[in-house]
Amino acid sequence: MRAKDCPFCVPGSERIFLSDEFCHARWDRHPVNQGHVLIVPIRHFADYFDATDDEKRSLWSMLEKAKELVAHKYKPDAFNIGLNVGEAAGQSVLHAHIHLIPRYKGDVPNPKGGVRGVLPHKQKYL
């Protein structure tokens, strides 16, 4: 995917609510739960592991700021944080990004195993 075709590279998105020189936080267009946020680097690259040290520091700092805002605004009970790196891992937008997904008691029958649920038959290990 080239930057000109990338939904995260389009300037002026009304969903962006925090930004700095390396990344921004935006509300997810197709949220898993109320308050679902994406932390997106400004520079276009697909693989999180290609981020510079400055970009990585910024991404995690922005995640912390977004978490505080979401916690205040939506009052979730917990959070999942996730990165999909590569199409085999489920990455559908080939621009690196971190998901901050608020979780609410009762949003699924049994949340045990959390992100292990990407392989449902391995989610429950105890």
Image: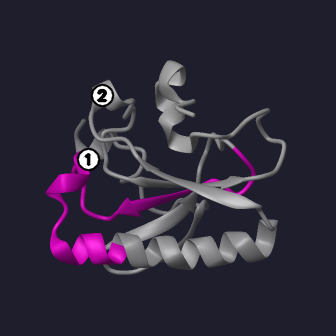
Kind of element beneath mark 1? helix
Q: Amino acid at mark 1?
A: Ala
| Alpha carbon distance from label 1 to label 2 | 17 Å
First of labels 1, 2 by sequence position: 1
Relative to residue 89, is residue 46 depicted above or below? below
Residue tagged by mark 1?
3
Query: Alpha-carbon neighbours of circle 2 within 10 Å: few (<14), some, or many (≥20)?
Result: few
In the depicted view, which residue is nearer to us: 114 or 98? 114
Instruction: Using the image as rendered, state which of residue 106 and residue 20 is in the foreground.
Output: 106
**Residue drawn at (64%, 78%), measured in percent from left and top?**
68
Residue at the image point whose x is 16% and y is 68% from the top: 52
Residue 49 - label: none
Split into 4 quadrants, where in the image is the C terminus?
Answer: top right
Instruction: Compare residues 3 and 78 and report the one nearer the observer.
Output: 78
Up-down relation of residue 75 to residue 37 (above or below)? below
Q: Is residue 26 positioned above or below 124 on the image?
A: below
Q: Residue 93 at x, y = what percent? A: 38, 38
101 on left or right of 119:
right
Is the residue 4 above or below the residue 36 in the image? above
User: Looking at the image, which residue is at 21% across and 78% down?
Assistant: 54
The residue lying at 21 percent from left, 51 percent from top is 45
72 in magenta: no
Q: Nearer the viewer, mark 1 or mark 2?
A: 2
Indicate whether residue 49 is drawn in magenta: yes
Q: Which residues are magenta?
A: 33-58
Secondary element at tag 2: helix
Amino acid under disc 2: Glu
Quarter of the picture holding the N terminus:
top left
Residue at which label 2 appears: 87
Crowdedness near tag 1: few (<14), some (14–19) or many (≥20) residues, C-alpha within 10 Å: some
Colour approach in the figure: one colour
Question: Based on the displayed image, in which of its 4 quarters is residue 59 positioned?
Answer: bottom left
